[in-house]
Image (tube, helix red, strand yellow):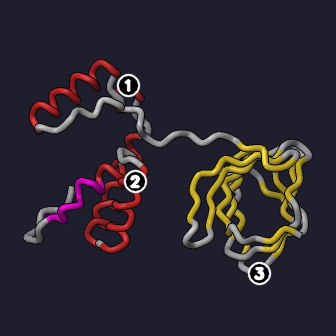
C-alpha cells in the first residue's frame, strides 16, 4: 500500500494492514499498537488504509468473508505454500460485547477500556424515563447520541448531537423521557454524587 519511494518499507507494515482489517488476535493487536506508537511510517500506512477499509463496509458480507468451505480450502493451500500450519478458524475476529445492566434503566456495552489512561468507550442505553446519577468529570467526557432524546442538565440532545464535558465540570441531571442510546467516551475516575 505504501507509496513508491527509495525508503524501504517497515517490516511491520503487513501486520498494520492485518490490524486495520481486524484480522489479528487480541495479543497481536497490543503488539501492533505498541509498534504504531513508535513508528510514524506505519501510522501513516494505517491512515492511508482507513478510507479504503471504510469503503469495504458497504460491500456485501459474502464478498468480504468467504464461506467456511472456501476458507478451509484457502487455509490449506496457503499452508502448503508457506509451510505453516493452516489457520482454519475464521471466527477469531472481534466478538460483539454483550449489554450489561449496570443500574435500573441503564445498560452498557463496553467497547474499549484504556486502563493506562483511565478512559473507557461504551454504548450506553437509558430506558424510557431512565436517569444517570449526578456525577463530576475527572476527564473529558464525549457523548454522541445515536437514538432517542437525552437531557443533560438543561440541554436537550437529539440523534446525531454531540456533547463534550470538560474536566472538573459536573452533570447534575442526565435523563431520557423517550429512552436513548449513545456512544460515551469518559474517564473511569468520574465521581458519582
> What residue is disc 2 on?
27
Of all residues, the one furthest to the top in this rendering is 69
> What residue is disc 1 on?
62
Camera-side residue of 8 and 114: 114
- The residue depicted at 16 percent of the width and 38 percent of the height is 84
Question: Dot 3: what SS?
Answer: loop
> In the figure, is residue 105 to the left or right of 87?
right
Q: Residues within 10 Å of mark 1 (few under 14, many from 20)?
A: few
Question: Dot 2: what SS?
Answer: helix
> In the figure, is residue 9 to the left or right of 151?
left
> What residue is disc 3 on?
168
Q: Which residues are magenta?
A: 9-16
Where residue 115 sits: x, y (%)? 58, 67
- The residue depicted at 11 percent of the width and 67 percent of the height is 8
Comes first in the chain, label 3 or label 1:
1
CA gap between label 1 and label 2 equals 27 Å
Residue 192 in which image quadrant: bottom right
Amino acid at each position: 500500500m505504501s507509496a513508491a519511494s527509495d525508503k524501504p518499507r517497515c517490516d511491520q507494515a503487513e501486520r498494520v494492514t492485518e490490524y486495520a482489517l481486524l484480522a489479528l488476535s487480541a495479543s497481536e493487536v497490543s503488539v501492533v499498537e505498541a509498534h504504531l506508537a513508535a513508528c510514524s511510517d506505519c501510522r501513516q500506512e494505517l491512515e492511508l488504509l482507513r478510507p479504503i477499509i471504510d469503503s469495504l463496509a458497504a460491500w456485501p458480507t459474502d464478498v468480504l468473508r468467504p464461506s467456511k468451505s472456501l476458507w478451509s480450502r484457502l487455509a490449506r493451500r496457503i499452508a502448503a505454500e508457506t509451510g505453516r500450519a493452516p489457520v482454519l478458524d475464521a471466527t477469531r475476529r472481534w466478538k460483539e460485547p454483550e449489554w450489561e445492566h449496570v443500574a435500573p434503566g441503564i445498560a452498557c456495552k463496553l467497547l474499549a477500556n484504556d486502563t493506562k489512561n483511565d478512559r473507557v468507550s461504551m454504548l450506553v442505553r437509558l430506558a424510557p424515563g431512565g436517569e444517570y446519577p449526578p456525577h463530576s468529570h475527572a476527564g473529558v467526557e464525549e457523548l454522541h447520541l445515536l437514538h432517542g432524546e437525552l437531557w443533560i442538565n438543561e440541554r436537550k440532545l437529539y440523534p446525531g448531537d454531540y456533547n463534550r464535558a470538560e474536566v472538573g465540570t459536573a452533570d447534575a441531571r442526565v435523563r431520557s423521557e423517550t429512552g436513548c442510546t449513545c456512544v460515551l467516551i469518559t474517564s473511569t475516575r468520574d465521581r458519582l454524587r
